[in-house]
Image (spheres, rainbow, N blue to C red):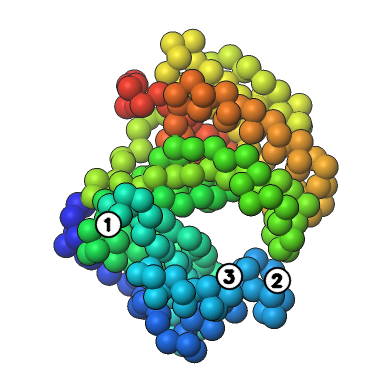
Amino acid sequence: MTGATGARDLAAAAARAAGVTLRTVHDVTGIAAVTDFFSDVWQTPRSTPPYPAEVLHSLVHAGGAVHAAYDGTRLAGAAVAVFGPPAHADVYSFVAAAAASDRGVGYAVKQAQRVWALEHGARTMRWTFDPLVGRNARFNLVKLGATGTEYLVDFYGPMADGVNDGDESDRLTVTWDLVHPRTPQHPGDREGAPATRVAPDGAPLARRDLAGRYVWCRVPDDIVKLRAAEPSLALRWRHAVREVFKEAFAEGYVATGMSRDGWYTLTRPSTEGAA
């Protein structure tokens, strides 16, 4: 489904399926509620939110948008987007979160962002996420059809929130074609490819097909729980996955998929879609 009209229809259907209503937020009370919501998601005291209300106000004043999803009167999800270079062609999604992602709230929020961006003339949207969080990778690369285009090492430096504390803040940039979202392609025969690296748990970490079309890389089942229980092991996973991505991206691969069992597919753009 392409274009602003199709995007609006898709966004409306996503909101109905998730049982939420979406609107942009401009008022002091509404933005304060979004700030508190982000504090709860990132497990920080509300007195020291990760995204202060005054920052969100400034971003809205600069032409950005704060989207909020409501389940009745309860805030169930929110996202913030601003325009980036080139002006009026690309939107940067500053932050997005949902309290009930299994219900499709996160998907509804992203579709609302897409409509807003298209109506303001944008054609692409970018954002970053932790590449070790497999469920987010699947959402971004498979559900939305975005593409992982850049690997950023320790992007934010040390982080002290309740989710990321103790880890290095590597991030994967994804680019979402808002007009023609990418349709996920067949990921190739991962099991038939030789393992090239071993993960911290002793099982294969990476595989590469002999034709040079695909690289596959595995992430842990739940990095957030692992980080809390065994931070040193979580950090070893960080470094191991980092090396695979850095090498693959240097060779021209991009991230195009994530399997339900935690394997990324990285594809050379000229061969994406090849059987």
* Front disc: 2 or 3: 3
In space, the residues marked 3 and 1 are separated at their CA atoms by 24 Å
The residue located at (43%, 80%) in the rendering is: 70
Residue 62 picture quarter: bottom left
Image height of 209 relative to 4, above or below? above
Q: Residues within 10 Å of mark 3 (few under 14, many from 20)?
A: some
The residue nearer to you, when weighing 28 against 58, is 58
Q: Position of residue 227 (x, y in %)?
A: 76, 50
Q: Position of residue 30 (x, y in %)?
A: 47, 85
Q: Is residue 200 left or right of residue 102?
A: right
Q: Position of residue 108 (x, y in %)?
A: 38, 65
Q: Amino acid at mark 3?
A: Tyr
In space, the residues marked 2 and 3 are separated at their CA atoms by 10 Å
Secondary structure state at the residue bearing disc 3: loop
Residue lying farthest to the top in this orientation: 210
- Residue bearing the label numbered 1: 88
The residue located at (82%, 47%) in the rendering is: 230
- Residue bearing the label numbered 3: 51
* Front disc: 3 or 1: 1
- Residue bearing the label numbered 2: 44
Q: In this orientation, does residue 66 appear?
A: no
The residue located at (53%, 43%) in the rendering is: 172
